[in-house]
């Protein structure tokens, strides 16, 4: 099977520098002058296949009674996941520009490339037999995809209907259908810290599946690359990545509870009660406060509420959150999956380690980068690892 190729031109956020002026990479925007010689920089993902024997399974740790196995591998850049009606796990990527499909044949998994040549097709969602993919500058939909994985054909192009900003800086998407049948996605801010159109960026928005009836669900959320709905209240919860270059321990990345459409969560002025010194002063109490801190620069991304019955009662209704791990911090942090537990009123009571071992704190080296979590119908939990191009499966008992 030859995957469909959808080559697109790269879009540049910043205009070309003046003659003789050195161009600053997007990730360095907002870096203070006194840190000009800093060695901190994003960790490039591995874009080649990691052999099964090189996937660091021996490092992975889960709580007593749980088991973790290598469920799928050989998919460079594997990030966000979506589950099809027939059990296909669709996988989006960023840098490598691919969309994968993983199928299970009696306990062994194989994968194929559905599409490649896309510009950061991180956002994927499945509903009513159709796969929707949101890249930086395209929205594509394959109808009846599970019946034609070997020959997916040409997708419907919904790009014009959704009218998404083309900016690459924080332009990659997380995409999911809500319990109301609408398609939700994030729109990250096109900078590290700046002023911008708050009706256009730092949002979570929703649409009808055809791209009509755009609605702002939350403002002032800098870059959410993961969200889900409470299984009982149907409130929207979202992870958020704070800005860089403000120090090793600030601001914290956060978890947000969105009770009403249009709530303002404070960016660029505030993260919780932390007022950004680079911006004009605002009273942070005027904004919605985070439901929990997820640590400074931990890069929390995919998250899901656990609705299965395989795991013990203490985990039911809790949120599993993948933290990809820091780059803008001298001492690395994250590179794990944590679980946030709630009380009966929906307040976060704890954020606890769940899947650990990929960060060697003493050597300050990481061996994997969890990006998303996905519950299978049997109640087990999948965890995607971008660095190793792998998916792990966590089970309990038996």
Image (cartoon, grey):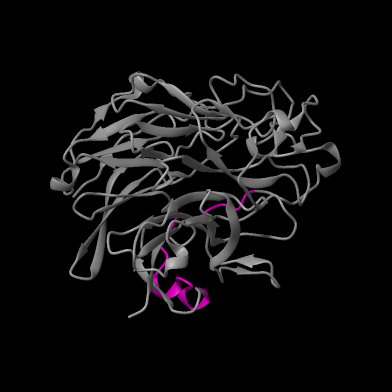
Residue 251 screen position, x and y as percent: 72, 44
Image quarter for residue 210?
top left
* Quarter that holds the C terminus: bottom left
Residue at image location 21% in from the left, 46% down from the top: 2
- Pick out the residue farthest to the right: 34
Frontmost residue, 342 versus 91: 342
Residue at image location 41% in from the left, 47% down from the top: 93
On the rendered structure, is 188 left or right of 90?
right
Please say whether residue 47 is one of the residues in the magenta stretch: yes
Question: From where the camera sits, is residue 46 visible?
Answer: no
Residue 353 screen position, x and y as percent: 57, 66
Residue 45 screen position, x and y as percent: 52, 54
> Image height check: is 93 above or below 396?
above
Task: Kindly report the secondary structure that dominates the magenta region of the rendered protein.
Answer: loop
Residue at image location 53% in from the left, 75% down from the top: 59
Residue at image location 42% in from the left, 61% down from the top: 316
> Image height check: is 382 above or below 33?
below
Q: Which residues are magenta?
A: 42-60
Frontmost residue, 253 versus 370: 253
Image quarter for residue 13?
top right
Number of residue marks: 0
On the rendered structure, is 349 left or right of 126?
right
Please say whether residue 177 is one of the residues in the magenta stretch: no
Question: From where the camera sits, is residue 45 visible?
Answer: yes
Residue 241 screen position, x and y as percent: 61, 43
- Pick out the residue farthest to the left: 147
């Amino acid at each position: 099977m030859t995957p469909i190729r959808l080559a697109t031109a790269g879009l540049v956020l910043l205009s070309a520098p003046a003659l003789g002026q050195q161009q600053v990479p997007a990730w360095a925007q907002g870096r203070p002058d006194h840190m000009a010689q800093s060695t901190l920089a994003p960790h490039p993902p591995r874009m080649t296949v990691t052999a099964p024997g090189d996937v660091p399974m021996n490092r992975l740790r889960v709580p007593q009674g749980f088991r973790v196995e290598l469920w799928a591998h050989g998919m460079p850049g594997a990030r966000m996941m979506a589950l099809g009606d027939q059990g296909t796990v669709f996988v989006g990527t960023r840098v490598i520009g691919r969309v994968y499909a993983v199928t299970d044949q009696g306990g062994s998994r194989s994968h194929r490339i559905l599409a490649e040549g896309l510009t950061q097709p991180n956002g994927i969602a499945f509903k009513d037999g159709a796969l929707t993919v949101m890249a930086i500058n395209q929205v594509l939909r394959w109808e009846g995809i599970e019946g034609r994985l070997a020959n997916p054909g040409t997708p419907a192009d919904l790009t014009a209907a959704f009218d998404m900003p083309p900016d690459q800086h924080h332009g990659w998407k997380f995409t999911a259908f809500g319990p109301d049948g609408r398609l939700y996605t994030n729109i990250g801010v096109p900078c590290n810290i700046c002023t911008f159109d708050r009706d256009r960026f730092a949002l979570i928005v929703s649409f009808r599946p055809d791209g009509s009836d755009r609605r702002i669900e939350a403002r002032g959320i800098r870059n959410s690359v993961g969200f889900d709905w409470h299984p009982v209240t149907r409130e929207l919860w979202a992870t958020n990545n704070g800005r860089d270059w403000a120090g090793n321990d600030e601001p914290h990345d956060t978890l947000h509870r969105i009770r009403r459409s249009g709530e303002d969560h404070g960016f660029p002025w505030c993260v919780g009660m932390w007022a950004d010194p680079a911006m004009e002063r605002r009273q942070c109490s005027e904004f919605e406060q985070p439901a929990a801190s997820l640590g400074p620069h931990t890069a929390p991304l995919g998250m899901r509420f656990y609705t299965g019955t395989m795991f013990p009662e203490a985990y039911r209704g809790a949120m599993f959150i993948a933290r990809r791990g820091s780059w803008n911090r001298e001492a690395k942090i994250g590179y794990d999956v944590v679980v946030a537990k709630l009380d009966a009123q929906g307040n976060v009571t704890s954020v606890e380690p769940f899947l650990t071992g990929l960060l060697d704190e003493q050597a300050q080296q990481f061996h994997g980068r969890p990006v998303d979590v996905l519950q299978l119908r049997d109640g087990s939990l999948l965890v995607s690892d971008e660095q190793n191009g792998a998916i792990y499966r966590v089970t309990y008992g038996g």
